[in-house]
Image (tube, helix red, strand yellow):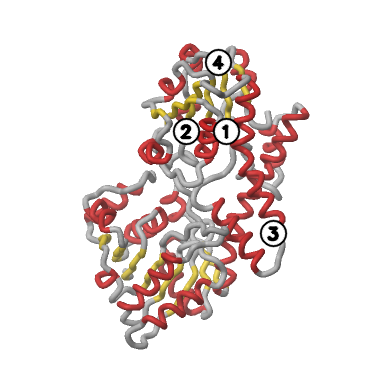
Amino acid sequence: MSRVTVIGAGYVGLTTAACFADLGNDVCCVDIDSDVVARLRGGEVPMFEPGLEEMIERSAAKQRLRFTDSYAEAVPGAEFIFIAVGTPMGEQGEADLTHVREAAAAIARHLDGGAVIVNKSTVPIGTGDVVSEIIRDNLPQPVPFAVVSNPEFLREGSAIFDFMNPDRVVLGAHRADDAQRVAELYKPLDAAILVTNLYTAEMIKYASNAFLATKISFVNEIARVCEKLDADVKVVAHGMGLDKRIGSAFLDAGIGFGGSCFPKDVLALAYTSQSIGAHPQMLNAVLDINNEQPVLLAGKLHEILGTLRDQMIGVLGLSFKPNTDDMREAPSLKLIKALLRRGAFVRAYDPAAMPKARRLLPDVEMKQDAYEAARDADALVVITEWNEFRQLDLQRLKSLMKRPVIIDGRNIYEPDELKAMGFVYKGVGR
């Protein structure tokens, strides 16, 4: 059993803390937001992530997981200190390291020596050195410590599974022995462990996310061509994915990617590339294509309806992906705001994200189910591919709508089937 401290109670921090505790470690999770800490101590998880609440409850009952807003309580005696705070997008697309810097300084003030500080946050190349310098500058007295990069590869909606069943664990350090210490924490997972230098580990995270985002934007560009040439992008993507060199993952055409990682990380990598004199043409194109996708869907609605002014548009799905309530950079925000600017009225339903969406979209009428969102609608737009939307009674849906128009932003329905039912149907690249 190791003593582990996790700084930050967001998606990554909570998942990391809960999973390490479930593996038998003594874990303390610290967050400067005392309200969040109070809710966690009361058994309330401030986000929707399948399995997380149950895992936290189980580990807390066994006294292997506790929460605090005090660095003085969390840092002394810790063998491993994971920094898992937010790195939001700066004004020019750069990663804002304010929270990382604050965490490093706070750790230093209470560090009693021998700990490994592990960067779990997604940070630009060279941030490990920045953290080391901040800690050295803020230590009350010199004590030994090490800094290791351990980027996360968790998908919201399946974060617990991803942590416990990783494709690989990446550990970067200036000294391999420091990385090997962290590797011991991951031994129960029987995962492939890749040890690199510090900068390579930081780059692996950015390169991985940028490549996945590139696959999405690539297939969306192919979808635009398919629409003009009467080809079906779903079949095209399936045919591509059968090639082992390509694979089928992230080849689903649609309204585009969102969330806290892909948009931010691609932009941050492009910023870094530009700042060192490189030319991130592909990264910029990935972002441009993605930003255009919601606008193209709004254009399809306008083309079918003739105008969007005074039209009632039902929206199914608000979170950026299913099985989460995360609204960060969600494509729904761009699409709905475009509809409202053009004079449309919007009703929406999402199984998990509506509490957050109400704050972000005060002009949108939130409904309690998909059928109410469709009632009297001139058109219905599917934005998030929640499983329950695949199982809807489409005949009932049609009977409730003013006009049977469906814009399928995730290609979850079959065009021929919906057209046979009397719907005017438009997918993406179909």
Q: What residue type is disc 3 on?
A: Pro
Nearer the observer, disc 1 or disc 4? 4
Residue position marked by numbered label 4 in the rendering: 404
The answer to whether one can see residue 78 in this image is yes
The residue drawn where x is 59% and y is 63% is: 204
Q: Please tell me whether mark 3 sits on a helix, a strand or a loop.
A: loop
In primary-sequence order, the first of circles 1 and 3 is: 3
**Which quadrant does the N terminus fall into?**
bottom left
Which one is earlier in the sequence, the residue at label 1 or at label 4? 4
For marks 3 and 2 on the same chain, the one whose residue lies earlier in the sequence = 3
Chain-order first, disc 4 or disc 2 = 2
Q: Earlier in the sequence, mark 4 or mark 3?
A: 3
Q: What separation in Å lies between label 1 and label 2 (alpha carbons)? A: 10 Å
Q: Amino acid at mark 1?
A: Arg
Q: Which residue is disc 2 drawn over?
A: 317
Relative to 195, does residue 338 appear above or below in the rendering? above
Which residue appears farthest toward the right when viewing the image? 229
Mark 1 touches mark 2? (CB < 8 Å): yes
The amino acid pointed to by label 2 is Gly
Mark 1 touches mark 3? (CB < 8 Å):
no
Q: CA distance from mark 1 to mark 4?
A: 18 Å
Q: CA distance from mark 4 to mark 3?
A: 43 Å
Q: Residue 65: which quarter of the image?
A: bottom left
Residue of label 3: 280
> In the picture, residue 49 is in which quadrant?
top left
